Amino acid sequence: MTDPGPPPGPPHDGLPTPAYRYDLDEVRRSHQRLMRALPAPSTLYYSLKANPHPAIVTALRQAGCGAEVSSPGELRTAIDCGVPPAQVIYTAPGKQDSAVAAAITAGAGLISVDSPLALDQVDAVASALGRTARCLLRVNDTSPAPGQAMTMTGEASQFGADVEWIGAEPRWFGSRPAAEVVGLHLFMGSNVADEDALVAQFAQAIGTAWRLAEAGVVNLEVLDLGGGFGAPFARRGELPAFPALAARLGCLLDERFPDWRAGRPAVAFESGRYLTATCGTLLCRVLDVKRSHGRPVVVLESGINHLGGMSGMRRLPPILPDLGGGTAAGEPMRDVIVSGPLCTPLDTWTRVATLAARPGQVLCVPNVGAYGLTASPLAFLGHPAPVEVVIDGGEVSHVSRLTVTREVIR
């Protein structure tokens, strides 16, 4: 880990730290970049799990994104941010009846189901409400595609129904009176930065969808191919380029579904990190600089409670962040232990940093707009959340702080 220099963009003077700074202009650029890489026509859903900040959701809705949500809270955020309910897809391998009811009542356009029981659940809830729900059957393919940072299919999983199970007992996966199966949902992997690997996983998904459609298992109106578009996390770097992806995927779809350009089936993709990763920077101050057993130790006001907590749950790679803004603090120290303020030895970002730092100095971590604040154990030890600062057109447009509250039930 080396010092990447001072933080880019608008100054942080006058703003409290720690702070997450989100640049909406960068969100819009990322959206344009991804849309150019996707075959047309296709629909893009923003996965709110990456960053549910309302300003980001609103900016992507204004750019034309639908919303992929997987909780009642994300559903409320999407609707409150103006996403048309018909452009919402509700996913998750397990849903409470109340969550299904909220999605149906809100008018969510699609509900992804992972089993016959989940399909029965949607049917029962929709019937009780006097509604009909449109469902996508999520498929767990036979084997994973190569080149994935995190496998989402091809192994025992809570996600989707095994393709062999669907093929062997198709009667269990058909439409119900109030739950119409209108398509397939295939999500092969996550955080893939290589175009060839993306093409391989989408080719496998398209082939599986074609076989299920040809076998008459599903009337394929909608084909959601998921996403998996990679992005840098807490490190310097640019979004990966996929210069030939649109043309290559178009050819694959032409081969299997000759009428897809006319919307038969309608093709959809999902993305979270690619749309938001590079918009975010975490600013945090140095609280202490000392030596321990001959090693330099830098203690920051942010730790795993603000960034990278999910790396311990294998959701993200182990965090090894770039820290900028330290060049004015003297000669860089080597083999620096960088920790946060939490009262646990687990609160360490790295033990091998090369860094110049002094108490009170503001350092920055780049490319943390995805899986940053809301993907970390914010409630652990009760430290205040960082403020979240939204930059639009080079100016601060919004400053807020996420709070964790306790609701009294009895």
Image (cartoon, rainbow, N blue to C red):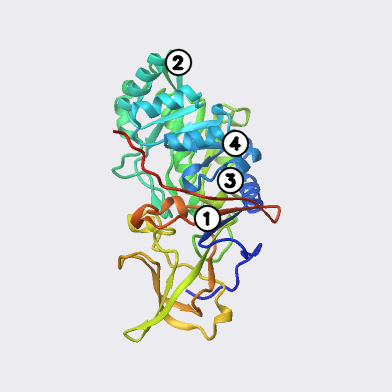
Q: Which of marks 3 and 1 is in front?
A: 1
Tell me the residue that label 2 is attached to.
Answer: 131
Secondary structure beneath label 2: loop
Q: Nearer the viewer, mark 2 or mark 3?
A: 3
Is 8 displayed left or right of 352 in the figure?
A: right
Quarter of the picture containing the C terminus is: top left
User: What label sits on residue 387 in the rendered view?
Assistant: 1
Residue 407 position, x and y percent, is 36, 39
Mark 4–mark 2 CB contact (< 8 Å) = no
Mark 2–mark 3 CB contact (< 8 Å) = no
Q: Which amino acid does label 4 sit on?
A: Ser
Q: Which amino acid does label 2 sit on?
A: Arg
Q: How far apart are marks 4 and 2 (CA)?
A: 27 Å
Q: Nearer the viewer, residue 187 or 345?
A: 345
Q: How far apart are marks 2 and 1 (CA)?
A: 41 Å
Q: Which of marks 3 and 1 is nearer the N terminus?
A: 3
**Label 4 crowd (10 A; few <14 / some 14-19 / many >=20):** some
Q: Nearer the viewer, mark 3 or mark 4?
A: 3
Q: Which of marks 4 and 2 is nearer the N terminus?
A: 4
Q: Which of marks 2 and 3 is nearer the N terminus?
A: 3
User: What label sits on residue 56 in the rendered view?
Assistant: 3
Q: Nearer the viewer, mark 4 or mark 2?
A: 2
